[in-house]
Image (spheres, rainbow, N blue to C red):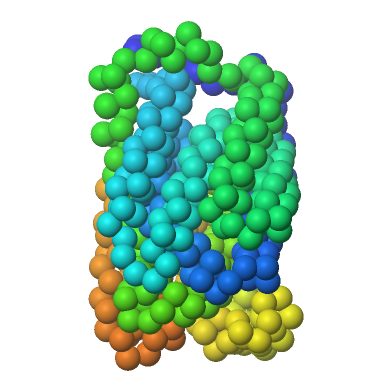
Amino acid sequence: MSRHPHNTASETPRGPSLQRNIAYAISARVFMALSQFAILAIIVHMGLPQDVGALTLASAIVTPLFFLTSMGMNEVHTVDDFDRFTRADYVALRFFAGIVAIGLTILVVVFFQGDESRLVQLTAIAFSLVRFFGAQSSLIHGVFQRDERLNFVAVSTIGRGSIGLVVFATTFWLTRNLPLALLCEAVAWFFSYFVVDRALLVRMNAQTQFAQLRQVRARTILALAWWVLPIGVALWMTRASASVPPMVLARYTDLAAVGLFGTLAYVHSALSMAVGPMGTASAARLRKYYREGRARKFSRLTCNLALFAGLIGLCAVAFGWFLGDVALGLVFGDTYRNAELFTIILLGTAVSIIGMQLLTAVTAAQAFNHRLLSSALGLVAAMIAALVLIPSHGVYGAGWAMVVMAVVRLIFALTAFRIVLGKIPQARGDAPSHSIVGA
């Protein structure tokens, strides 16, 4: 008998099909990626190159900290069988972990030295508040994903992205003050969380009441944190890997060069945001297949996701090679027109998004330590490649460092997936398939 009852929203009507859920998830994340891209474009056109560089460094500092303290709770929540922890435990841990991330951000930026250090410091602190409220919404999305209601994720994401973009654009246009605009965006995200997300939880009868939060025990929160810590460390190392090139680049070049790389490298975040939901929308289904010993279905779904991600990546690389120069000139102007660097970054992104789908399956199997090893090796590869290539090749070295990191992570993600596939409890009539192309 479980210590905690299963806290699900099973009373709600059956949600959309898997195909529609994937479509909802992708459309929502594409919209969010476009809204964040619009913010970047606004900074490029209305602000200074130093503003773009400051945002790039702020993201490199803040995002890994939030990936670490979030500990992948929305992903783990989606595949948790709720035999040890309740939803209230997750909510409490996410809130306190977010506070820790803000504190760590302040601690890190206090010691930051370099060009426009005050601008970078204030931008990082304001950006950490944006990430804090985004992290709270992300956990709620885990609730929706668990019950395969990705239409609710779409409503939440589009609402948050829209209001954040409008508020940021208005504030930056009036003040040309990047930290202030980010602070106002954080307030807008809180408003969206409080109004939109809470209303959707009520519709699912899945809201966590304050009385439930008061019953959460510190020992339980610590046990949950310890259980999901490998995923948190893995996500931190994954995001830290992407932060290594701009951080090393800042050491050997100026803030404007960092801004150039950060602007073009946003395509990595955008494509990851767009393709990642294919895995998150399928996580609950993958967990079900794993738990029921349906190895063939587990393998087929994972491989279909990886193949589709690879097709998207191939199209992206082709776009960068043939149309990158024209597209960058139209969107950002001549200062950021560098199709060669853009294509290199897209190549690394194409490899990375394939590995993301394999790691989703590893998470669904709750093989957290395998994912940790894959991310650790990717971080080591990124550090070595950045330190070797950037001093002599500048921004191009930073781009190739991303490619090296992605290839290493893909190799070990594939290895972890094959290990997990071989350990699925065999169900009658469904022998496991050990081929990466599925049955």
Viewer-nearest residue: 389 or 102: 102
Q: Where is residue 436 in the image (x, y as percent from the top left)?
A: 45, 63
For the point 44% across and 75% down, which residue is it? Answer: 255
Q: Position of residue 221 (x, y in %)?
A: 32, 24
Q: In this view, does 98 lie above or below 161?
A: above
Quarter occupied by residue 363: top left
Asked if one can make out residue 400 in the rendered structure from this viewpoint, the answer is: no
Viewer-nearest residue: 173 or 307: 173
Quarter occupied by residue 81: top left
Total numbered labels: 0
Asked if one can make out residue 192 in the rendered structure from this viewpoint, the answer is: yes
For the point 43% across and 30% down, which residue is it? Answer: 95
Is 387 displayed left or right of 117 in the figure? left
For the point 59% across and 57% down, which residue is it? Answer: 177
For the point 61% across and 84% down, which residue is it? Answer: 335
Q: In which quarter of the image is the N terminus?
A: top left
Q: Position of residue 310 (x, y in %)?
A: 56, 69
Q: In this view, does 297 lie above or below 86?
A: below
Q: In this view, does 211 lie above or below 53?
A: above
Viewer-nearest residue: 20 or 159: 159
Q: Position of residue 112 (x, y in %)?
A: 31, 60
Report the residue that reaches farthest toward the bottom. Answer: 392
Viewer-nearest residue: 255 or 39: 255
